[in-house]
Amino acid sequence: MNANKSSPRFVLASASTARLKLLRMVGIAPLVCKSDFDEDRVQIEDPAELVTTLARCKAETVAPQFSDALVLGCDSILTINNRIYGKPDSSQQAIARWQEMRGKMGKIYTGHALLDLEQQRKIIRCGITQVYFANISDRTIEAYVATGEPLKCAGSFALEGKGGMFVEKIEGCHSNVIGLSLPLLHQMLENLGYNITNFWQ
């Protein structure tokens, strides 16, 4: 790795406030450029392949706007008993999902696609974290869904929000559950020849 390598502009191809907060927390101030990629175009049953494909498509949709940037695309899903869950479409769906999730272990898959436009290189990875959910009551589920938080999140919960109270244990990367594995991003940047400290603001 060349520690003196200059660092290009860092672009986050996502409107996710959670991912933006994670990057800012570790000193990276990205340019946010929301991807308009239609996720319904991708129909893949394997969860790891699905999230990495969506992450790559999001990054590639944004990339033509830049010439020498690093473009990061991400996508997350939850699986319970090998069934894939993305963002719920309605409060009713979120309630039904929580009734299925409670007391069980699920897996959060987050795809990461980092495009280095200057070097014309890309690295694609998938982070997987096991999440153990509390066995909460119907009343608590309905009250949580009524806050609106589950409707904004893959898997119908936000670890960094109220939903954190209903997660009993995590095995694997904590930030991967929020939507971006910081250790994985560090490895990807190093593999492209960048020193993470050069991105610190």
Image (cartoon, helix red, strand yellow):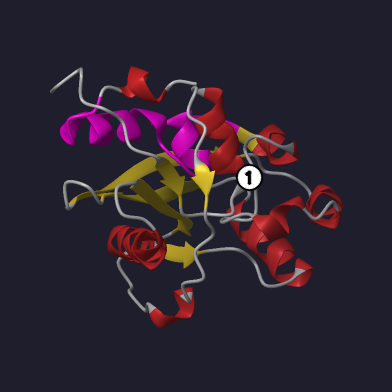
Q: Position of residue 9 (x, y in %)?
A: 39, 39
User: Relative to residue 36, is residue 185 depicted above or below?
Assistant: above
Q: Position of residue 120 (x, y in %)?
A: 17, 53
Q: Is residue 93 left or right of residue 83?
A: right
Q: Is residue 2 left or right of residue 156?
A: left
Residue at image mark 1: 17
User: Relative to residue 197, is residue 121 depicted above or below?
Assistant: below
Q: Position of residue 50 (x, y in %)?
A: 34, 65
User: Relative to residue 112, is residue 162 depicted above or below?
Assistant: above
Residue at coordinates 74% horizontally, 62% vertically from top-left? 95
Q: Quadrant of the N terminus?
A: top left
Span colored in magenta: 168-194
Q: Is residue 42 visible?
A: yes
The amino acid on which the numbered mark 1 sits, given as a three-letter code, is Thr
Residue at coordinates 33% horizontally, 37% vertically from top-left? 8
Seen from this angle, which residue lies furthest front? 67
Given residues 51 and 47, the one toward you in this image is 51
Mark 1 neighbour density, 10 Å: few (under 14) some (14–19) many (20 or more): few
Residue at coordinates 41% horizontally, 63% vertically from top-left? 58
